[in-house]
Image (cartoon, grey):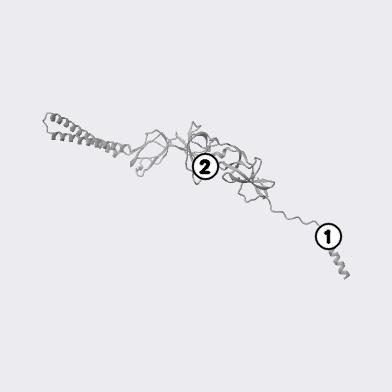
Amino acid sequence: MWMAAVVAAVVTTGCGKNTDKPALPEQQGPAALGVKAIAPSTELSANVTRVTGQVRSKQEATLSAQATGTIARMLVKVGDKVKKGQVLAVLDTSNVSIGVEQARAVKAAADAALQLATNNLERTRKVAESGGVAAAGLDQAEIGQKQAAAQAAQAAAAVRMAEENLRDMSIIAPFEGVITARAKNVGDTVAMMPPTPVFTLVDTSGLEVRALVPESVVDKVKAGSKTQGTVSPSGMRFDVQVATVGAVVDATNRTVEVLADVVGDTAAPLRPGALVELDFSSVGETDDKGLFLPTQAVSAKGQQGFVWVVQDGTVRKRDVRVERVLPGYVRVLQGLGADERVLADSSLDVKEGTAVRVVQ
């Protein structure tokens, strides 16, 4: 029993020494969330008001023959400048020319018959005045003259029709422009129905730019306002004047079609089909001063919304009032200071007091 008491005392003394050792460090909490934080901009960058457009001609036509036949002559090639009314190609006119000659011969005979009937009517009237011809004879002469006149008119119409058919054998430029495509050659057969495309004619003097402008900007774009465009990739600048602003918003991409006329001289010729950028930063009465944030940084419905402000390694929800000014940007009207930083993406899965670590 004495030995057992000694062993117990030794064991008890050893446990007391262990309690004097320093405790193990506590387990750390979850790691802070890496986030991107941004500060509001005090000015809008000009590039957010630029939209891409395409140069096109106000007049462009695909030309075909007004008759069916074989191409006998090609008078122009791709790249040629042509004037309004210029003949571009001619079909084989052999049969049509014969038809014109026949119609003219018939008209000549009808004209002669009309002259004869007219002379006969005049003689009959003179004789009738002296009583030498009965009334029935005068009536017959008058009817004969009217019939001859109708036949002459019919023959004249046939001549006009034949001559029109002859003109239809030529493809004529409807306006001044440049031949940009030629689909047929000499010897090819073309049809009137359905029309066979032969040439593409483009008026390069009257150019316009078609651009799809975001609906958030389009209200500031008015017909008659002027701005500048830049050709891509050459960088050549030119002036345009807004001609029309569409009345319908495209439901797919939320844009409105804007047509702007190219005005003034350009350093080099503008070509239809070229891609350009239109700068609407100076159009309208847009105020480019204030505090601006990307729309992704603000969770808002209308003017009311909130942002996540980064403070002392955590995020705090801050109510703000905003207005949409340009595509992808809002102006902060109330609730945020210029020196504060907010999460770049308001849709992140965070809550009040979440620990964060700014990574950019």
For mark 2, does the 10 Å Cα neighbourhood hold few (<14), some (14 to 19), or many (20 or more) residues?
A: some
Q: Which of 188 and 264 is in front in this view?
A: 264
The quarter of the picture where the N terminus appears is: bottom right
| Circle 1: element type | helix
The residue indicated by pointer 1 is 17
The residue indicated by pointer 2 is 215
Res 105 visible: no
Horizontally, is 319 left or right of 100 in the view? right
Would you identify the image quadrant in which residue 297 lies? Answer: top right
Instruction: Please state the horizontal and vertical placement of residue 339, each as a whole percent of the image.
Output: 66, 40
Q: Nearer the viewer, residue 304 or 15?
A: 304
Circle nearer the viewer, 1 or 2: 2
| Circle 2: element type | helix
Three-letter residue code for mark 1: Lys
Q: In this rendering, is residue 281 above or below 8? A: above
Three-letter residue code for mark 2: Glu
Q: How far apart are marks 1 and 2 (CA)?
A: 78 Å
Horizontally, is 331 left or right of 168 in the view? right
